[in-house]
Image: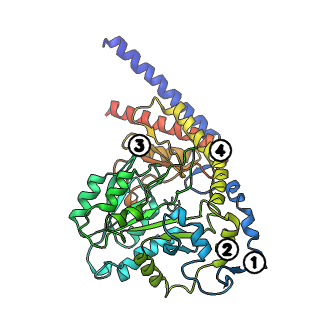
Amino acid sequence: MTTEVAQAGVAESGVAAETIRAGYEAFKARGLKLNLTRGKPAPAQLDLSAELLALPGAADYMAEGVTDIRNYGGLQGLAEARRLFAGLMGAPAEQVIVANNASLALMHDTVVYALLKGTCDSEKPWSQQGEIAFLCPVPGYDRHFRICEDYGIRMIPVAMNADGPDMDEVERLAAGDASIRGIWCVPKYSNPTGAVYSDAVVERLAGMKTAAADFRIYWDNAYAVHHLTEEKVEIANILEACARQGHANRAYVFASTSKITLAGSGLALFASSKDNVKWLTARMTPRTIGPDKVNQLRHVRFLKDEAGITALMERQRALIAPKFEKVLEIFDEKLSDVAGVSWTRPKGGYFISLDVPPGCAKRVIELAKAAGVELTPAGATHPLGKDPEDRTIRIAPSFPELEEVALAAEGVAVCVKLTVEEKGQQRVSG
Ligand code: PMP
């Protein structure tokens, strides 16, 4: 390259850098207040279930089997509620537990029960067996990691691919280390990448050798029916695969209606082998005399059957899918030509995962905050809040109005460009 051409190149990139900075300053000057932090349903989504607030009605309090829902009892949940969700959970109704709101609470409790009492296959409580570790596909869900962190469970990150975790690594680790007792899995439309576990991955998880006899798969199927496209992706049945492979007790399946009906007043769902259901109901016995059956009956009256769930989720999709399309459209337009930047195109769920060049995520989030766009903290997708490469940003477009989502996505794109530009300058001057 001649000196003249090189100088022209530097001058040109200087102009580009100025344009990017001016774009950022202009965005900041608008004084916006936008928030893409958490995967909350928008008010319009909650409105779809407004009828729930009036159900079941003052005269409707007898459930099947002459259960008075106003009274104590029914630890495993109403029979009609367990039947309603049996298909979604991939288990017979007898092996489903319907509990109060928040499947996270069930995940938390099953971990704590295993620590204090042991699973139904444990010789001793986990807490009496030295160090306990969980495999954590990354990027993953921060609240899973938080449970481990809170109870001193060591987290071992494993790479998450488009078809599930890196199974060579999972098999190697699980077979070689008896302190590893579990793995967190969001098998469909995973948080935050939208990845879907392939049949081969499900089969390998079900069949793999584990050094610990009481190894558990925490199968958090939070987005089982949360499609964003016409295609309704289905995954293999983990409970059937585990049973077929001779590990019937290996998987705990969780889901909830938090993002089907009301996030703050849904039903949490658990399904597993007969032994695990017996184990969990035994653990729940000292804790509660029974769940909120009024909420269960009102869900049964409102959703009615699987077709009712499908119809409601179609209406949810009509509200939420355009927001995802808008973010993707803006990223495609503004970021396609930025080296080292990529993002996922989920077919369901609540998140898009945006990857920026290593060492850039914190700075993007800092710039966005200063410009009025709140993003999930950098590192949240990794154990202990530490993304070793500082590159993953979780985008949650569900809550704001469509116009705000568009503005926020533009703001994020400007911040990514500016960060990449700044890093480039640092490299040149360094
Ligand atoms: N699991 C995953 C993967 C999630 O993304 C969320 C919500 N962000 C939850 C569980 C929380 O579910 P619940 O409301 O049933 O506790």
Q: Which mark is residue 94?
A: none
Q: Secondary structure at mark 2?
A: helix
Residue type at mark 3: give it: Cys
Earlier residue among tags 1 and 2: 1
Residue at 35% from the left image edge and 51% from the top image edge: 200
Label 1: few (<14), some or many (≥20) within 10 Å? some
Q: Pointer 1: what residue?
A: 60
User: Is 377 drawn above or below residue 248 in the view shown?
Assistant: above
Q: Nearer the viewer, mark 1 or mark 4?
A: 1
Q: Pointer 4: what residue?
A: 404
Residue at 60% from the left image edge and 35% from the top image edge: 26
Q: Pointer 3: what residue?
A: 360
Query: Gap between marks 1 and 2, in whole Å?
Result: 9 Å
Residue at 78% from the left image edge and 78% from the top image edge: 58
User: Is 129 drawn above or below residue 247 in the view shown?
Assistant: below
Label 4: few (<14), some or many (≥20) within 10 Å? some
Q: Nearer the viewer, mark 2 or mark 4?
A: 2
Q: Nearer the viewer, mark 3 or mark 4?
A: 4
Query: Do the residues bearing badges 2 and 3 touch, measured as CB atoms within 8 Å?
Result: no
Q: Is residue 243 visible?
A: yes
Q: Pointer 2: what residue?
A: 297
Query: Do the residues bearing badges 1 and 4 touch, measured as CB atoms within 8 Å?
Result: no
Query: Gap between marks 2 and 4, in whole Å?
Result: 37 Å
Q: Secondary structure at mark 1?
A: loop
Q: Is residue 112 visible?
A: no
Q: Using residue 177 as the reference point, say whether residue 39 is left or right of it.
A: right
Query: Do the residues bearing badges 2 and 4 touch, measured as CB atoms within 8 Å?
Result: no
Query: Gap between marks 3 and 1, in whole Å?
Result: 56 Å
Label 2: few (<14), some or many (≥20) within 10 Å? many
Residue at 62% from the left image edge and 67% from the top image edge: 264
